């Protein structure tokens, strides 16, 4: 994928600043260095591709009272691209297709949109890094990342990391993913540890599960994990945990999630079958930011 496609959301600058109030809020103008630092900090936190860096190279008069026009160099390895942007002289707002409040931390803003009440989780709630995963039990990439989280992330970081699981079954392409999500939520009704037993069992048996045998396979996992199987089956047959699945899907859609697995590491979005090194980079960065 080219750098242009990776940073495409940053390239569409609106030239309609004058229509949005005509300029800055009236605060004192920042120096170029202070303005650049604020802009770069925001964009660095907003990009999801590891290794991308931003450098502001120049400013000029934007032709709009209270606004300045800047040029930013976006780099990824040997690839570079110049992107224009507009920012108020007081460093409060910037244009890159939307009006952005630069005083709001985009990572914290993302985390504020995620529900953490009564959710399947691993690790201490006061961990410095929270990884929220939107996943699909029939997704092969999700199964691959499941192994990475188990064998690398949790092993290497211990109580520094909390993992929160959310269901995002892609039912249009995965015929048994919706029922698997329901099974996991029915297991969760009997305890957090029961959820993770179901979670691990569904991923480990992914190759053997079909739409026709999902209920039986989930029942076997429930029995082996010590669940009240009758209660589990009643929940599954009556879809008594469907609301929980639907809430996860709605939340994911509101965050712009459209594929699995998708992760938010302290609010920073990552997608796909991430390698251990990708998680390490994101987690170490989050740990450094929390020092």
Image (tube, grey):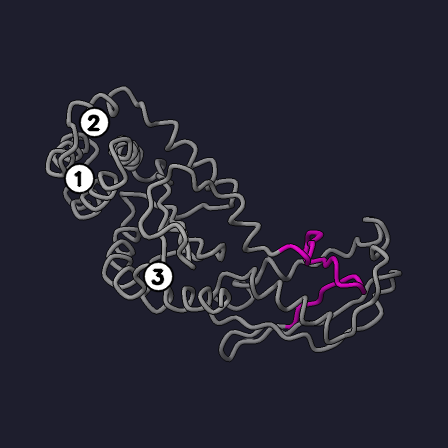
Question: Can you give x and y, in whole percent of width and height, for residue 14 in the image?
Answer: 73, 55
Percent across and percent down for residue 118 are 38, 37
| Residue position for label 2 | 232
Residue drawn at 74 percent across, 57 percent down = 93
Q: Kindly identify the residue that appears in the image at 28 percent across and 66 percent down.
A: 156
State yes or no: residue 101 in magenta: yes
Q: Residue at x 64, y 54 (%)?
A: 104
Which comes sooner in the sequence, label 1 or label 3? 1
The part of the image, by quadrant, that contains residue 13 is bottom right
Decide if residue 109 is on the left or right side of residue 130.
right
Whether residue 276 is situated above or below residue 164 in the rendered picture: below
Left or right: 77 as drawn, with respect to 143 = right
- Name the front one of labels 1 and 3: 3
Magenta span includes 121 = no
The residue at which mark 1 appears reads as 209
**Badge 1 vs badge 3, beta-carbon distance below 8 Å:** no
Q: Residues within 10 Å of mark 2 (few under 14, many from 20)?
A: many
């Amino acid at each position: 994928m080219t750098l242009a496609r990776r940073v495409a959301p940053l390239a569409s600058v609106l030239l309609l600043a004058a229509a949005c109030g005509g300029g800055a809020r009236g605060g004192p103008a920042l120096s170029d260095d202070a303005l650049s630092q604020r802009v770069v900090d925001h964009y660095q936190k907003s990009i999801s591709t590891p290794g991308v860096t931003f450098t502001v190279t120049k400013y000029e008069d934007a032709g709009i009272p209270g606004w300045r026009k800047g040029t930013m160099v976006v780099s990824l390895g040997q690839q570079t691209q110049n992107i224009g942007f507009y920012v108020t002289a007081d460093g409060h707002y910037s244009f890159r297709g939307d009006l952005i409040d630069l005083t709001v931390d985009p990572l914290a803003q993302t985390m504020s949109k995620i529900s953490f009440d009564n959710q399947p989780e691993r690790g201490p709630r006061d961990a410095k890094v929270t990884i929220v995963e939107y996943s699909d039990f029939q997704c092969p990439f999700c199964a691959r990342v499941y192994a990475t989280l188990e064998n690398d992330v949790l092993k290497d970081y211990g109580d520094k990391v909390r993992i929160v699981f959310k269901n995002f079954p892609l039912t249009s392409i995965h015929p048994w993913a919706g029922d698997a999500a329901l099974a996991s939520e029915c297991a969760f009704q009997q305890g957090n540890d029961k959820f993770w037993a179901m979670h691990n069992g569904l991923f480990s048996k992914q190759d053997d599960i079909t739409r026709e045998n999902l209920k039986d396979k989930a029942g076997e996992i429930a029995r082996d994990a010590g669940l009240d199987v009758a209660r589990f089956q009643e929940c599954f047959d009556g879809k008594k945990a469907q609301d929980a699945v639907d809430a996860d899907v709605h939340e994911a859609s509101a965050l712009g999630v459209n594929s699995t697995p998708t992760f938010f590491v302290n609010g920073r979005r990552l997608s796909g079958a991430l390698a251990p090194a990708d998680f390490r980079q994101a987690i170490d960065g989050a740990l450094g930011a929390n020092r």
